[in-house]
Amino acid sequence: MPRLLSIVMTLACLAAMPCHAIDLGKVGPVYAITEPDFLVEIKAIVQSKVDSGEWAKIQRDMVRDSVKAMEHPAPVGTFAIAREAKTWYYDPTTILTKDILDAQGQVLYPAGTRVNPLDVVTVGTALFFFDADDPLQVKTLEQTLTRLHGQIKPVAVAGSYLALARKLDRTIYFDQAAVYTKKLGIDVVPALVSQVGNQLKIEEIIPQ
């Protein structure tokens, strides 16, 4: 306590002392700012590229690369080619980790409830996963379209799917970020996914 009182009194004395400004003079040479303005420099660089035609080339290259990426996107993963006919099932049942509420805040489904979306939702159109750059898989797709009277949605996992869509004159989807194949555990193509009851049947088809 005496130490604290001493500190407080010292600070009070310092606060009460008059303050005087002292001119210490120059301690070193003073120079004007010579660095160019950053924004002015950037503008000059861009203008030089515009004047030389380099900027137009950069834009053309960007458009070309964007079109190339759209026309022939990178494969979403590594997929084996089906060598034998195989069928297995995927159960989408999940266990809720939190309560599902209605618009009034009432609990519809409490946490811990087992829920299967296929109990209330129907997948009306089968999904056909394939490599759009593999001629045999494309032929298998065409055969499957004929067999199922066109009632499938082709989903490419690799290849020039837009060019194939133009050739077949129908919409072909692309499994962006492998959302569906990862969810369903598909690593072999071509694969046909259809609903059977409250499960999904996944058929690995030998391309031929």
Image (tube, helix red, strand yellow):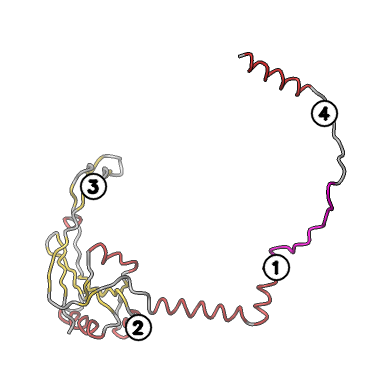
Residue 6, compared with residue 151, is above or below; it is: above
* Disc 4/disc 2 C-alpha distance (Å): 82 Å
The image quadrant that residue 90 belongs to is bottom left
Q: What residue type is labelled 4?
A: Cys
Of the image marks 1 and 4, the number of the one nearer the N terminus: 4
Residue under circle 3? Answer: 96
Of the image marks 1 and 3, the number of the one nearer the N terminus: 1
Q: Residue 41 carries which label?
A: 1
Question: What is the span of residues highlighted in magenta in the rendered image?
Answer: 27-39
Given residues 52 and 145, the one toward you in this image is 52
Identify the residue at image location x=16%, y=58%: 91
Reply yes or no: does residue 31 show up in magenta: yes
Q: In terms of secondary structure, where does tag 4 sit?
A: loop
Q: Residue 19 carries which label?
A: 4
Q: In terms of secondary structure, where does tag 1 sit?
A: helix
Mark in front: 4 vs 3: 4
* Disc 2/disc 3 C-alpha distance (Å): 42 Å
Identify the residue at image location x=19%, y=67%: 124
Mark 3 is surrounded, within 10 Å at the Cα level, by few (under 14), some (14 to 19) or many (20 or more) other residues, namely: some
Residue under circle 2? Answer: 163
Of the image marks 1 and 2, the number of the one nearer the N terminus: 1
Query: Is label 1 in contact with label 2 (beta carbons under 8 Å)?
Result: no
* Disc 1/disc 4 C-alpha distance (Å): 46 Å
Q: In terms of secondary structure, where does tag 3 sit?
A: loop
Identify the residue at image location x=31%, y=86%: 167
Identify the residue at image location x=55%, y=78%: 59
